[in-house]
Image: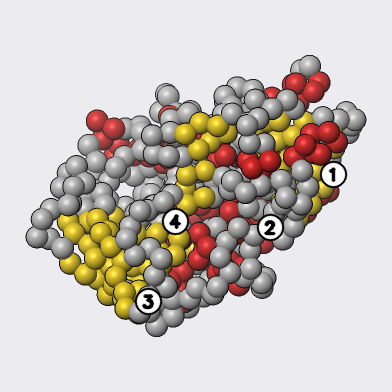
């Protein structure tokens, strides 16, 4: 905990943003960092609440010891704070930027709508640790002679690779794209997280003996069977990248796109890379001077909104089939769990028009080119309400309704018939493995992250990567000292 009476004396403050009129002119991060004394004051608000739901499975998938490092920050012990934070989370500078902070929802002070600014403090600890030189390679002192391959360098793959490398194994990471990071690099816009943070971690991991093989599409350029033959263990962290099928008439019109190719293209532009990317369409998609409609109400949809504004869109409309949530939740009914309530992302606050309880009936066009989106209102069971149809002008439309599993053209195609898959009621296909040993139906093959659990949060991917690394280390060595 922080200061005993801090929660009574200090108001909640979080980092401020640049004005929307300024931040839409660039793709850089726009959060204005708080000063060290301000961060320490916010850490001081952490109270002796008895049962800190913030760091249990309710609030934090990686079980960050939040009261402990809040107290360390309050007492100006930044080195111990980053050591504590790293004991549960390999990449706090990632989660401090892009995690939606279920820990704050679970904070006892959230009963009064003033939770501790946990996310702000977490990011500050990581950034301060880099500034002071506390984050350095930690190579293993003893090498096991075991060799492990990791397929995919997203947050699950990176977390597992770092843990396995520090356990003394020889680790090789295989990435389909030209640089490591997975959807951290190519899916999340730079205005939410600049990619130099990934580069710094990659350099640290290289210093710990991890080898990255980029531009290698496993299952195509190199066979999974070859990796299994050459390594003592293989961990599959392929993510969940296949877009969910919308089934909306007119989807083939020019101007209608899935969300992810659009985001990947722009991230590659910002990173000064060619926009061509394995698995995604390569025709340029740009929103400048266009009316844009985004179908979907989640984070990916919001990222499309922010990207479109930065490209110069005239107007951006976001369609959500769900009813508009209440401004305030019933605390006694939902706390400490994540509440359904009205939330406005930074991208939506930049000027998006939001339509709730609206279904997308059809994309309409002329001469094969999109001109509008036909919509209607829906009832509480998401059934169209007769007579409520309307058309929104659109030159460009993005479908952001989620993902149904990993790409099927590489690893899954090669292991077809050998790898046990599970298809849920929404049509998502995931690789079957439990969350204890993470073993698949293929000998020497483990899996973790979105490819196993379905699309989820970065913090869950880190959690699964760490746990899978522990399971692999235990399987190879008979015991493990890696944390659970």
Label placed on residue 300: 4
Identify the secondary structure beneath mark 3: strand
Residue under the point 56% across and 65% down: 281
- How packed is label 3: few (under 14 Cα within 10 Å), some, or many (20 or more)? some
- How packed is label 4: few (under 14 Cα within 10 Å), some, or many (20 or more)? many
- How packed is label 2: few (under 14 Cα within 10 Å), some, or many (20 or more)? many
Residue under the point 47% across and 52% down: 243
Of marks 1 and 3, the one in the foreground: 3
Mark nearer the N terminus (4 vs 1): 1
Q: Is residue 174 left or right of residue 270?
A: right
Please give the residue where the numbered disc 3 appears in the rendered image: 369
Q: Which of 104 and 398 is in front in this view?
A: 398
- Occupied quadrant, residue 176: bottom right
Looking at the image, how many numbered discs can be counted on the residues? 4
Of marks 4 and 1, the one in the foreground: 4
Of marks 4 and 3, the one in the foreground: 3
Label placed on residue 209: 1
Distance from disc 2 to disc 4, alpha carbons, whole Å, reads: 20 Å
Residue under the point 17% across and 67% down: 390
């Amino acid at each position: 905990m922080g200061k005993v009476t801090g929660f009574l004396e200090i108001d909640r403050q979080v980092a401020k943003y640049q004005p929307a009129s300024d931040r839409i002119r660039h793709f850089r991060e726009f959060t204005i960092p708080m000063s060290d004394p301000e961060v320490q004051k916010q850490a001081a608000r952490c109270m002796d609440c008895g049962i800190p739901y913030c760091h249990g499975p309710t609030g934090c998938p990686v079980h960050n010891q939040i009261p402990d490092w809040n107290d360390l920050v309050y007492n100006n012990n930044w080195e111990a704070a980053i050591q504590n934070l790293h004991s549960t989370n390999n990449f706090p500078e990632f989660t401090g930027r892009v995690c939606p902070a279920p820990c704050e929802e679970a904070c006892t002070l959230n009963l009064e709508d003033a939770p501790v600014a946990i996310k702000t403090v977490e990011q500050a600890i990581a950034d301060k640790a880099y500034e002071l030189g506390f984050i350095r390679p930690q190579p293993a002192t003893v090498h096991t002679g075991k060799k492990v391959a990791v397929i995919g360098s997203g947050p699950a793959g990176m977390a597992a690779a770092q843990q396995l490398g520090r356990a003394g194994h020889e680790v090789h990471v295989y990435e389909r794209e030209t640089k490591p990071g997975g959807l951290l690099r190519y899916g999340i816009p730079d205005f939410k997280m600049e990619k130099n943070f990934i580069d710094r971690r990659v350099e640290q991991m290289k210093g710990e003996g991890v080898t990255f093989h980029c531009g290698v599409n496993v299952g195509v350029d190199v066979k999974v069977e070859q990796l299994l033959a050459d390594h003592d263990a293989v961990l599959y962290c392929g993510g969940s990248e296949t877009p969910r099928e919308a089934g909306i008439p007119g989807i083939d019109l020019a101007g209608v796109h899935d969300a992810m190719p659009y985001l990947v293209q722009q991230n590659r532009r910002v990173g000064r890379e060619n926009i061509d990317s394995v698995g995604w369409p390569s025709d340029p998609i740009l929103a400048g001077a266009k009316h844009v409609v985004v179908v979907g109400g989640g984070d990916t949809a919001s990222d499309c909104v922010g990207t479109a504004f930065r490209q110069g869109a005239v107007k951006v409309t976001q369609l959500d089939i769900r009813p508009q949530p209440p401004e305030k939740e019933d605390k006694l009914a939902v706390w400490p769990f994540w509440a359904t309530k009205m939330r406005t992302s930074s991208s939506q606050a930049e000027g998006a028009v939001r339509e709730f309880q609206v279904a997308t009936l059809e994309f309409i066009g002329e001469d094969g080119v999109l001109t509008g989106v036909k919509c209607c209102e829906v009832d509480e069971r998401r059934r169209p309400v007769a007579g409520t149809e309307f058309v929104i002008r659109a030159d460009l439309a993005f479908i952001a309704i989620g993902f149904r599993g990993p790409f099927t053209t590489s690893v899954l195609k090669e292991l077809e018939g050998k790898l046990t898959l599970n298809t849920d009621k929404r049509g998502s296909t995931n690789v079957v493995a439990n969350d204890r040993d993470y073993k698949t139906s293929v000998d020497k093959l483990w899996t973790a992250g979105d490819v196993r659990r379905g699309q989820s949060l970065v913090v869950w991917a880190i959690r699964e990567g760490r746990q899978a690394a522990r399971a692999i280390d235990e399987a190879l060595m008979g015991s493990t000292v890696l944390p659970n």
